[in-house]
Amino acid sequence: MDDPSIARFADYLTEQWFEREDIHNYLEPFSHCLQTVLQDKLYGQHLVLRAVVNHVRAHFENKHPPKALTLSFHGGIGTGKSYTAKIIADHLFKGGMTSPFVHLISASKEFRRKDMIDVYRDQIHNWIETNISVCSRSLFIFDEMDKMPAGLLDTIKPYLDFYQQIGGIDYRKATFLFLSNSAGRQITDFTYKQLKSNVSRESIKLKDMQNIILNQIGNEDISRFQIIIPFLPLEKRHVKRCIQDAMEAREYFISESIVQEVMDEIVFYPQDEKIFTVTGCKKVSDKMEYVMFS
């Protein structure tokens, strides 16, 4: 464990670094820009927009937050969880995902062996403590949380609580993003039932989805630290906009016929109704290139 005096000095240096770089470039303007980008580029996720903007803004405008910000993203493949994490990183630090203060770890890549749980626990402790000693505002992104070995998540729990310090280090300014496919099917089922009942997706309430997710993940001890944010399944209208964005990014001429060709390559379900896309917008770029070079 780091010496408390060293940890405090490191925290002081971090704050001085932010001041030298002009803290307003990192904290104040980002909230407005974050909302604008999410509104313009994150499709079909009205529940995500308000929750993310409000919680991130409140956390980063508070010089002394009571606890670390912990957002838990749940939903199916390609619904925008990783994309939202990237947007958050882009609006917190210069360099976004390449910033030395942004840390990404993939559960399926880093925690493959169940017989190495104790090793993984030590690695997580060292990883979090070392990085927060350098920058108290560090952003940690844990991807594929549904693939994390049972019990390993509890290793992170002390850093998410209301403790003023642990081993001389204050973790309350940090941000943790947990990305998971868990409860994806339940989120889709609920959305489908709402649509079939002539209830628009925009009328779906955050608390209803949060209850569905909490019932599915079933870990009340860790969930009490998290802000649960659901990502709804994407419909054709959302995928169409993803295709247009992908074509614009590659500077392709956007024509309705080409967009439709790409749409025809994407799998939708249920089989007879084709309401939701199986892979969200995840495969859009691959399908677009296939059509453009056919």
Image (cartoon, rainbow, N blue to C red):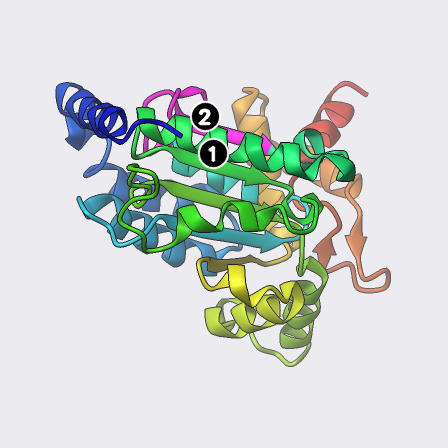
User: Is 118 colored magenta in this rendering?
Assistant: no
Query: Horizontal and vertical percent for residue 148?
Result: 67, 44
Residue in view at x 52 percent, y 49 percent = 43
Q: 123 or 263: nearer the eye? A: 123
Q: Which residue is mark 1?
A: 86
Q: Residues within 10 Å of mark 1 (few under 14, many from 20)?
A: some
Camera-nearest residue between 77 and 273: 77
Residue 100 position within the rendered picture, expressed as x and y whole percent measured from the top left: 39, 20
CA gap between label 1 and label 2 equals 6 Å
Task: Say which quarter of the image contains residue 95.
Answer: top left
| Residue 278 in the figure: left or right of residue 59 | right
Res. 184 image quadrant: bottom right
Q: Say if 98 sits above or below 11 in the image.
A: above
Q: Which mark is residue 116?
A: none
Residue at the (38%, 42%) spot, across then down: 175
Q: Identify whether 181 is placed above or below 97.
A: below
Give the image quarter of residue 90. top left
Residue at the outermost bottom position = 197
Residue count near mark 2 (Cα–Cα under 10 Å), binned few <14, some 14–19, many ≥20? many
Any part of residue 74 in sight: yes
Q: Which residue is mark 2?
A: 97
Question: Which region shows up in magenta?
Answer: 90-105
Percent coordinates x, y for residue 207 in the rendering: 47, 73
Badge 2 marks a residue whose secondary structure is helix
Q: Is residue 46 visible?
A: no
Q: How many marks?
A: 2
Instruction: Look at 27% across and 28% down and name the residue there.
Output: 7
Looking at the rendered structure, the kind of residue marked 1 is Lys
Which image quarter is the C terminus in? top right
Q: Say which element carries label 1.
A: helix
Asked if labels 2 and 1 touch by Cβ distance under 8 angstroms, the answer is: yes
In the picture, the quarter occupied by the N terminus is: top left
